[in-house]
């Protein structure tokens, strides 16, 4: 070790390698927000909050019911599409005015998602007011809610919260509301 510390070039190399290893360790090992009494609360912007929706949807086995004011995050749409391809029933209840906000890449991803078997979409009637929820349930056991839209900026730039309940009771409460919203006579079905 003495040879490395007395030779300036070797010392610089040792410090650079050590710094790179430390940086890699810090980046590779993000802390996970703990679940306390079945609840995880995350705040955006943060790397963990960015990926929690994709990870949660990736764990779905039977069904996903989502109520979304904005749906422009292409990684989330891809996760929903992958779930549907695994046989998961995906129902999306959306606000027509702000679903993709005219973003062409998001519109393409949205159309691809809508064309996927096992995906059904409905829009709340424009005359009935805004559909402003940002929530979904997975397999009648998890509920995700909070202020963060399902958008690129909602997880990367905006100050929001994301709350995940590992609770069949909370998921059932949302499920009852979702069924009422889904059954509204003035809803508009998405035409594939």
Image: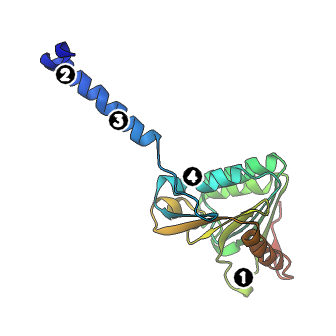
Residue on which the image places disc 3: 22
Q: Is residue 125 left or right of residue 41?
A: right
Decide: few, some or many residues near mark 3? Use Cα within 10 Å; few <14, some 14-19, many ≥20. Answer: few
- Between the C-alphas of marks 3 and 2, the distance is 16 Å
Q: Which of marks 3 and 2 is nearer the N terminus?
A: 2
Q: Which of 191 and 19 is in front in this view?
A: 19
Q: Which of 111 and 33 is in front in this view?
A: 33
Residue on which the image places disc 4: 51
Q: Residue at x 83, y 64 (%)?
A: 191
Number of numbered markers: 4
Depth check, mark 4 against mark 1: the one in front is: 4
**SS at circle 2:** helix
Q: Which residue lies furthest to the front in this view?
A: 37
Depth check, mark 1 against mark 2: the one in front is: 2
Q: Residue at x 17, y 15 (%)?
A: 2
**SS at circle 4:** helix
- Between the C-alphas of marks 4 and 3, the distance is 23 Å
Q: Which of marks 4 and 2 is nearer the N terminus?
A: 2
Residue on which the image places disc 2: 11
Decide: few, some or many residues near mark 1? Use Cα within 10 Å; few <14, some 14-19, many ≥20. Answer: some
| Rendered location of residue 121, percent (x, y) | 79, 65
């Amino acid at each position: 070790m003495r040879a490395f510390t007395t030779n300036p070039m070797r010392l610089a190399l040792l410090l650079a390698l050590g710094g790179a290893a430390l940086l890699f360790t810090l980046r590779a090992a993000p802390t996970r927000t703990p679940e306390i009494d079945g609840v995880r609360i995350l705040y955006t912007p943060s790397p963990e909050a960015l990926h929690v929706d994709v990870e949660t949807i990736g764990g779905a086995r039977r069904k996903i019911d989502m109520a979304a004011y904005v749906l422009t995050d292409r990684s989330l749409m891809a996760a929903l599409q992958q779930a549907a391809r695994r046989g998961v029933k995906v129902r999306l209840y959306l606000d027509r005015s702000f679903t993709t906000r005219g973003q062409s890449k998001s519109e393409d991803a949205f159309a691809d998602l809508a064309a996927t078997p096992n995906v059904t979409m409905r829009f709340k009637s424009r005359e009935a007011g805004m559909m402003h929820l940002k929530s979904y349930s997975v397999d009648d056991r998890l509920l995700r809610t909070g202020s963060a839209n399902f958008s690129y900026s909602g997880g990367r730039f905006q100050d929001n919260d994301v709350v995940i309940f590992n609770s069949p009771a909370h998921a059932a409460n949302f499920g009852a509301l979702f069924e009422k919203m889904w059954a509204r006579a003035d809803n508009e079905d998405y035409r594939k």
